[in-house]
């Protein structure tokens, strides 16, 4: 995911995290912090910092292709 894509995320959006070569975990966005630090927080109380954006994808197919 690019920084520009991250900035467009809204609460309730679905994104995908690559867990291994065959699986992509669906995560629901809770909030996106863009001020002091850039982080995407999910409803399961986990988050993705700016340095890990490469592991988050907008679509499941993109995620699985990349894995």
Image (cartoon, grey):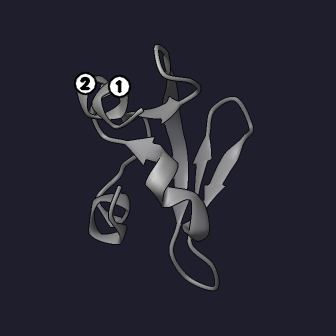
Q: Is residue 26 above or below residue 31?
A: above
Q: For the residue labelled by badge 1, is the local secondary structure a helix, a strand or a loop?
A: helix
* Residue on which the image places disc 2: 61
Q: Work out which residue is located at the far top of the displayed protein and give it.
A: 22
| Residue 49 sits in quarter | bottom right
The percent position of residue 30, horizontal first and vertical second, equals 55, 42
The percent position of residue 62, horizontal first and vertical second, equals 26, 34
At 36% from the left edge and 70% from the top edge, which residue is drawn? 3
Q: Nearer the viewer, residue 56 or 23?
A: 23
Q: Nearer the viewer, residue 48 or 23?
A: 23
Q: Work out which residue is located at the far right of the displayed protein and give it.
A: 45
At 28% from the left edge and 69% from the top edge, which residue is drawn? 4
At 54% from the left edge and 51% from the top edge, which residue is drawn? 31
The percent position of residue 59, horizontal first and vertical second, equals 27, 32
Q: Is residue 50 left or right of residue 54?
A: right
Q: Quadrant of the N terminus?
A: bottom left
From where the camera sits, is residue 39 visible? no
Q: Quadrant of the C terminus?
A: top left
* Residue on which the image places disc 1: 64
């Amino acid at each position: 995911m690019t920084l520009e894509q991250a900035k467009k995320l809204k609460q309730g959006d679905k994104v995908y995290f690559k867990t291994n070569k065959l699986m992509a975990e669906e995560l629901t966005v809770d909030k996106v912090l863009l001020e002091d630090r850039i982080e995407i927080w999910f409803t399961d109380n986990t988050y993705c910092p700016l340095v890990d954006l490469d592991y988050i994808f907008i679509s499941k197919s993109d995620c699985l292709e990349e894995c």
